[in-house]
Amino acid sequence: MTEKNTPLWEVFIRARNGLSHKHVGSLHAVDAEMAMQAARDVYTRRGEGQSVWVVRSSDIVASDPTEKETMFEPTGSKIYRHPTFYDIPEDVGHM
Amino acid sequence: MYSQGLIGADGSTHEDAAFLEAFQKRVDAELKIEPNDPMPAGYRKTLVRQIAQHAHSEIVGMLPEGNWITRAPTLRRKAALLAKVQDEGGHGLYLYSAAETLGVSREELVDQLLSGKAKYSSIFNYPAITWADIGTIGWLVDGAAIMNQIPLCRCSFGPYARAMIRVCKEESFHQRQGYEIMLTLCKGSEEQKAMAQDALDRWWWPSLMMFGPHDADSTHSDQSMAWKIKRFTNDELRQKFIDATVPQAEFLGLTMPDPDLKWNEQKGGYDHGEIDWDEFWRVVKGDGICNRDRMKARRKAHDDNAWVREAALAYAEKTAARETAVAAE
Ligand SMILES: [Fe+2]
Ligand SMILES: [Fe+2]
């Protein structure tokens, strides 16, 4: 028997309108149709979702964990991107 | 499953002291460890083993109850049992996915179960003989599972903790439906109540064994505690379970099959009789009542369904090839 590994899919669910799709887990399926059916059975047995996305894991491009520093560190020093950086007299009121 | 998943787990690791210290610092600060983060080899190995055994337990755990779906006494009970068994299948799948993030494939994991290389919880090697067993399994076995799984929601490894949060949300219905079955039997005829007592007599001790060996005999447990894979020791969790369960048995009017069980005012918990550890190790090592049956059933299911996997894959490949051909035109 020549068994190939069944591809991995990532599952995203929108719990209700107004919320974005959120990653809930993964599963194995040979094609999109079966991935969608499995996602419904595995991840929405109690009305957890209004909408489901399934994406082949191999199609996801992820940031390199070893380059975390170069990737995210530069924003650490840019404190002027935050509202608290600016001094506004209290008399002005809420801004 | 759970604490039993650590039996024989070897957390030994060979990284240098600075690496281990930095890792321990992150764990101590309650920062979650994610799959791509640097981690000691022993941490990865321990987790793969524990999560995989937990997953196998969910899957094998479908067998004793699945056996009763067609014989449930009412449609209400049947629907509930069907939903519960389906949940257990889901739990197995969440857990396999969590283990796979550590670099092991689903095929390898399934293979380890079917070849007998990996273990699953000893509890599922006991038979479900009467309908009262289904009530007792929900009440005690899922009850013990919940006791074990709640602290695992805070496990240092992110994917395992997240899977446990989903699982715990679903488990409470399992325990409640089991206890409700027991309540109904205990309010029924003399025979029904006797059936409930008989099931409790058979399942009580094996349920206590679900928490694994005594702390003194539990090797590698300290390392798992330090890495915050585990938050409580086997004996601590077992004690919590006993203290929570004894009053529930009293409410049912049933008697725990342990003459030494009595309230200890000083420790604020129950003292209990000696657990038969010979029986425990016999079952863990493959000599329980149902070990052979369970493995046979799993292997048969895998073999009988091989054609489905093959056909689905062939269909997917054919469809993909046709789409490529159309796109090329
Ligand atoms: Fe479960
Ligand atoms: Fe359960």
Image (cartoon, helix red, strand yellow):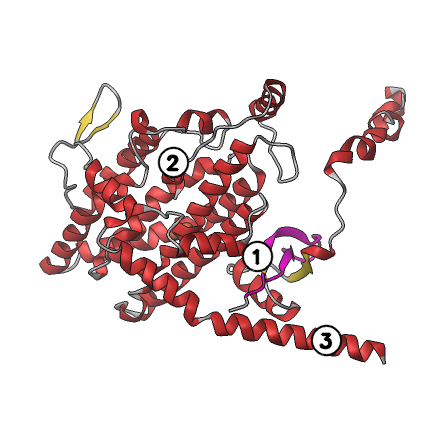
Residue B321 is tagged as 3
Q: Quadrant of the C terminus of chain B?
A: bottom right
On the image, the x and y values in percent for residue A66 come to: 74, 35
Subunit that carries the residue with mark 3: B
Inspect this view and state whether residue B80 appears: no
> In front: mark 1 or mark 2?
2
Helix, strand or loop under label 3? helix
What is the distance, in whole Å, between disc 3 and disc 1 at their CAs? 35 Å
Instruction: Please name the amino acid that badge 3 sits on.
Output: Ala
Subunit that carries the residue with mark 1: A
Res. B82 image quadrant: bottom left
Give the residue at x 87% y 27%.
Answer: A78
> In front: mark 3 or mark 1?
3
> Viewer-proximal residue, B128 or B138?
B128
On the image, the x and y values in percent for residue B129 come to: 20, 60
Helix, strand or loop under label 1? loop
Give the residue at x 14% y 41%.
Answer: B257
CB under 8 Å between callouts 3 and 1?
Answer: no
State the residue position of label 2: B8
Instruction: Please name the amino acid that badge 1 sits on.
Output: Glu
In magenta, the rendered stretch is: A3-27
Q: Quadrant of the N terminus of chain B?
A: top left
> Viewer-proximal residue, A67 or B307?
B307
Subunit that carries the residue with mark 2: B
Find out whether residue B102 is within the magenta segment. no
Give the residue at x 71% y 54%.
Answer: A18
Helix, strand or loop under label 2? loop
